[in-house]
Amino acid sequence: MRLRVLFPAAALCASLASPEGRALPEPARIVRYDIRASLDAERHELLGTETIRWTNPGGVGVGELKLHLYWNAFRNNRSTFFRESGGRLRGDRADEDAGFGSMDVTSITSGGLDLLRHARFEAPDDGNRDDRTLLSVPLPAAVPPGGTVHLEVAWKGRFPKVFARAGYVRDFHMAGQWYPKLAVFEPKGTRRRAEPGWNAHQYHANSEFYADWGDYRVALTVPERFVVGSAGALVSETRTNGKKTLVYEQESIHDFAFTADPRYVVKEAVWDPERDLPAAEVARAARLLGRTEKELRAGFRKVALRYYMQPDHVAQWTRYLDAHRWALTWLGLYAVPYPYAQSSCVDPPEDGMGAAGMEYQTIFTAGTARVLGVWPLTGLRPQEMVVIHEFGHGWWYGLLASNEFEESWMDEGVNSFTEYEMMDRRYGGMVTLPFGARISSFDEERIKVIAAREADRLVTPSWRFADEPSYARNSYARGATAVDQVRRILGEETFWRAFKAYAERWRFDHPTTEDFLDAFRPYAGGRLEPLIRETWYGNGKVDFAVSRVSSREAAPFEGYDDRGKKVAAPKKKDRKAKTSWESTVLLTRTGTIPLPVDVVLTFEDGATWTKSWDGRAPWLRLRATSASRLTKAEVDPGRRIVLDADPWNNARRLEPVRGASAAAKVRAYAVHGVQILLSSLWPLL
Ligand SMILES: [Zn+2]
């Protein structure tokens, strides 16, 4: 999901490929859903039945199942979601007149036995008795390890008025988390847990989802005039009595969403790696990753791309397409190739932007506004950004299915990191200023991190952050900047090789924070530990500053010499032209994260002196004797400490000549200020 808000008009914020290059993990098939649902578009209701087939992946018998009934988050203003959010999310507000939605399970049976009678709602996170988003279903007999159970579930869902991902407005319907969905039973060792057990949480204001791998077959019945976009591949379509039933199938996913709206204009394209993988990009990746081009190309497959466009946005579909193609290329090279045969992009209406910017597997929602297609707003790229972000989730929530309840940074943070990289590489950032200057997405987002008084750790359950801005800042920009900091410490080659190895190892699995960090630790020799301790597991900060600078002409000898003879200082006019200068620089590290950093001293004759500092001590004093006067001291001139809380104190200049005018001093400071500003502008520096 995308939280970045640009401005009000754009409140946006088959079968699987088997890569020939190297053998990558395949998903465990834990669950199978066979769903039949019909949409009552007038009443905005869904009537559904589903057969859930669950296989116990653990080493112990399991006596109960847990079902997420996510739409009960919108049931009333007593749900945990409403209590936490006040009915608001991402600046969008629930329309309380008609806004409520619900999910009423009317029957659960297994082998003909009624299981609903003993089912009960649970609220493990806050004990809220009014919350109905998590249902525990006791089974008549425990499912043995490796054993399978079938559940037959019937339910009625009411779409909420769209404001938090799912819902309806007019005829537009976005169905996400719309069916009773099994929670994840984690065997011992999964996500490093010591004992097997369910990992199940309520639907919180600031949480997304976590589910297990499986296969889906979904039959949707809708009024004939509706255009449907869905996860999976359409395998059949039948029409009777003004209705049509569309059957979709998809293997090896953990989420299934669809959309229906009679107004959609569908645009289609095919991404063919034979034709669409840019040779220069493959060559660059091969060099950086230390792989052959042949190996990198091996896992790619053709992907059918579909765009479900609002009629007034149709002209913008090619902007979605360009970003979509670039993400298929970049993520395929630096992470793992996209394994599915299709990817669909939903363009919500402007009065349904609560559904914009959300990820599901093989389908995602983007978002634009008509006005964004008009100059000068065409210099902004929220359309490209939202596609790259939401489709990118297909990797960091999708293929590497992290637990978004408990470790939101692993999805939003890693995904924001790859989003900034892709936006900067392809477009030079999200904004083009006059004269072609661009603002890097990394710099744009870093400002949020360094300007904040941080209260939280990156690794915090999503409902336990101090407030919504802290959840958002940590999960997105701070997570991404921390990953960028790891890259700056390790260097490009080492970082990307480890990053790709992480993606390959955890494809179709459930990685944790420690799995991510362990991918980089072997190459860091302990250098990452203070950063990890103070960022992932702390609310630390770092700020390097040049606190004091002085440079004085060395005084000529004066006083008693070795033989006890008194020597007077030479008169000024008798001094030799050649003198030496003694300079002192005091560097300080405030904040709690010691990081290695470079310091550069620049002298009047143009000479420079570079020194590496491990950054461990709270301060460092440098003394230099030189033939020329010190004019500038700067810490981290390469801007490698991306978490530096105040880049404005990173350098000090001495006035150009002794007794310089106030104007010269102002000029010197102004030059320094402009340098810092320019370092944020791309590609000028
Ligand atoms: Zn997101």
Image: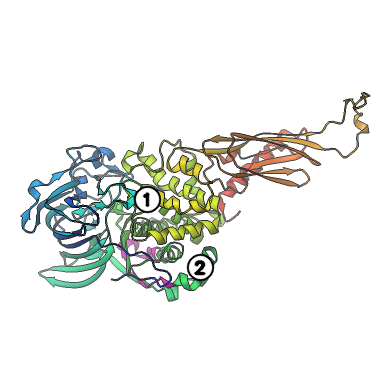
Occupied quadrant, residue 297: bottom left
Q: Does residue 295 appear in the picture of this structure?
A: yes
Spatial CA span between label 1 and label 2: 26 Å
Residue 100 located within the stretch drawn in magenta: no
In this rendering, position of residue 408 left or right of residue 76: right
Occupied quadrant, residue 309: bottom left
Question: For the residue marked with disc 2, what is the amino acid?
Answer: Arg
Which x, y percent locates residue 683? 57, 56
Q: What residue range appears in magenta?
A: 298-322
Q: Secondary structure at mark 2?
A: loop
Rendered residue at 34%/49% (across/down): 192
Question: For the residue marked with disc 1, what is the amino acid?
Answer: Thr
Rendered residue at 29%/66% (across/down): 265
Which x, y percent locates residue 570? 92, 29
Q: How many numbered circles does the render carry? A: 2
Q: Is mark 1 within 8 Å of ligand 1?
A: no
Rendered residue at 67%/37% (across/down): 666
Rendered residue at 38%/72% (across/down): 301
Disc 1 or 2, which lies upstream in sequence?
2
Q: Does residue 99 appear in the picture of this structure?
A: no
Q: Is residue 215 above or below residue 607?
A: below
* 580 vs 355, nearest the viewer: 580
